[in-house]
Image (cartoon, grey):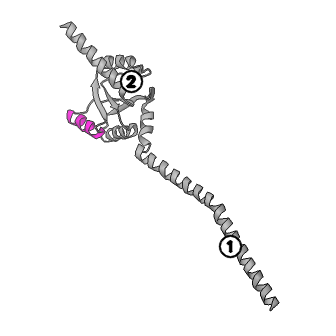
Amino acid sequence: MADKIRADKATAVAELTEQFRVSQATVLTEYRGLTVAQLKQLRRSLGSTTTYAVAKNTLAKRAATDAGISGLDALFTGPTALAFVGGDVVEAAKGLRDFAKAHPFLVIKGGVFEGRPLSADDVRKLADLETREVLLAKLAGAMKANLSKAAGLFQAPLSKAARTVAALQDKLEQQQQTSESAAA
């Protein structure tokens, strides 16, 4: 019986380790006081790219260590649930922040992003960023504006040269008219 329990724990640690490795970010939360229905609602609100799992602290701590993540040991206290983010980290952080505002029993403890530990404040700062799509749209708009300016700069010498040639042509025509009228 003890071997089966150890095997189950080893399997759980291996699964959590893999989740830590493949996730772009992981956010640790305390869920004490939330109902099963509220946890279900939270999982749905996080979308399909974020997995929200309740885990034993000792197993989660061991899995984080096995995945090469350090600096989270102090966060593994109390009932802990992990949000493994596979998609947009900002979107997941916004989902957790918004759910925590509506349900004060959800407490964001901190997390890890790109191998670096995050405090709860860092997660909130991530949530305050604009989503990836919005940032990409702004970047595209800025690039388009800069390209339009560049095109204008490249066209400016040509249009200036064309205006200069037209002015010279007008001047020559006036001189010819003046010389013709003087000869007549």
The front one of 117 and 114 is 114
Mark 1 Cα within 10 Å, few/some/many (few <14, many 20+)?
few
**Residue at screen point 31% across, 42% down:** 102
Mark 2 Cα within 10 Å, few/some/many (few <14, many 20+)?
some
Q: Quadrant of the C terminus?
A: bottom right
Q: Main secondary structure of the magenta part?
A: helix
Q: Residue 150, position in %: x, y?
A: 59, 55
Write down the residue under mark 2.
Answer: 75
**Residue at screen point 36% across, 22% down:** 76
Q: Is residue 94 left or right of residue 163?
A: left
Instruction: Looking at the image, tell me whether mark 2 or mark 1 is earlier in sequence order.
Output: 2
Q: Is residue 168 left or right of residue 84?
A: right
Q: Residue 70, position in %: x, y?
A: 43, 20
- Residue 2 occupies quadrant: top left
The vertical placement of 182 against 44, above or below, is: below
Q: Residue 167, position in %: x, y?
A: 71, 74
> In the current view of this chain or complex, which residue is farthest to the top?
2
> In the current view of this chain or complex, which residue is farthest to the right?
183
Amino acid type, callout 1? Ala
Give the number of callouts.
2
Asked whether residue 131 is in view, the answer is no
Residue 166: numbered disc:
1
Asked whether residue 71 is in view, the answer is yes
Q: Residue 15, position in %: x, y?
A: 29, 21
**Residue at screen point 42% across, 35% down:** 123
The front one of 134 and 35 is 134
The Cα–Cα distance between marks 2 and 1, rounded to whole angstroms, is 75 Å
Secondary structure under the numbered disc 1 in the rendered image: helix
43 inside magenta stretch: yes
The vertical placement of 21 against 88, above or below, is: above
In the image, which residues are magenta? 35-46
